Image (cartoon, rainbow, N blue to C red):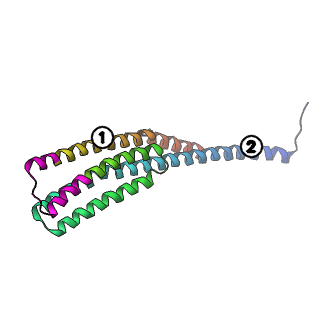
Amino acid sequence: MKISLSLSQQGLILVGLPVGLMVVFLLTLYLLFLKLENDASEVDHSKTILAAANSLVKQNYDAASQLIIYKHSRDQQDRDIFDKQILSIEKSFDKLHVLLQRDPKGLELLAKLKKTADLGITFMRRYESYLSKEIRLSELEVAVLYKELDDCGKAFAAKLQKLDAHEAALHKLNSLEERQTRLSFKVWILVAAA
């Protein structure tokens, strides 16, 4: 059976088939681009979470350092700075809670981290209370308080490491893989242009 097509039908096939294939190719390329952008957005979100979580270490260190400054200066302004730093820690936990809303396991790890941080803040507040009331502590009492705070700091670091490891494991796409994916995307664009 021989099919005979008119000249207009043959032209439509000659033009329509490559255009149709090009549309399918471009649609596939667009979907690949959307997936790549979504993956990159998730990785950026994880990096934001990791940066916010790791900044807690500095904030706690700064608060403890300010407490020592207050111990030596007994200046109300130094105590106010200490209070502001404690508030910044609370705000950072609130920010992390918002960032981890879609991750129940991350929220669970954050709750454990916050519980440990709250215990450390309680120790710092207790010491600050002794200082502001000018209650003299014996060397043994100071050593015990320091040991409690040190143990709390170690527990905080361990729990922070678990949160970091969890967040890093969520997105195994590292920078090399991301570059390779972007390179393959560029190659597809070049192939389409040729």
Give the CA separation, mark 1 to mark 2: 61 Å
The answer to whether residue 62 is above or below residue 19 is below
In the picture of the structure, the residue carrying the numbered disc 2 is: 17
Circles 1 and 2 in contact, beta carbons < 8 Å = no
Is residue 118 within the magenta segment?
Answer: no
| Residue 79 picture location, percent across and down | 19, 65
For the residue pair 46 and 188, the one nearer the viewer reads as: 46
| Residue 52 picture location, percent across and down | 35, 52
The amino acid at mark 2 is Leu
Q: Residue at x 42, y 38 (%)?
A: 169
Name which quarter of the figure residue 130 lies in. bottom left
| Residue 88 picture location, percent across and down | 31, 60
Give the magenta range: 122-144
Compared across the picture, whether 171 is left or right of 132 comes to right
Q: Residue at x 57, y 42 (%)?
A: 191
Q: Is residue 66 visible?
A: no
For the residue pair 127 and 22, the one nearer the viewer reads as: 127
- Work out which quarter of the rendered image holds the C terminus and state it: top right
Instruction: Considering the whole magenta stretch, tell me its main secondary structure.
Output: helix
Q: Is residue 166 visible?
A: yes
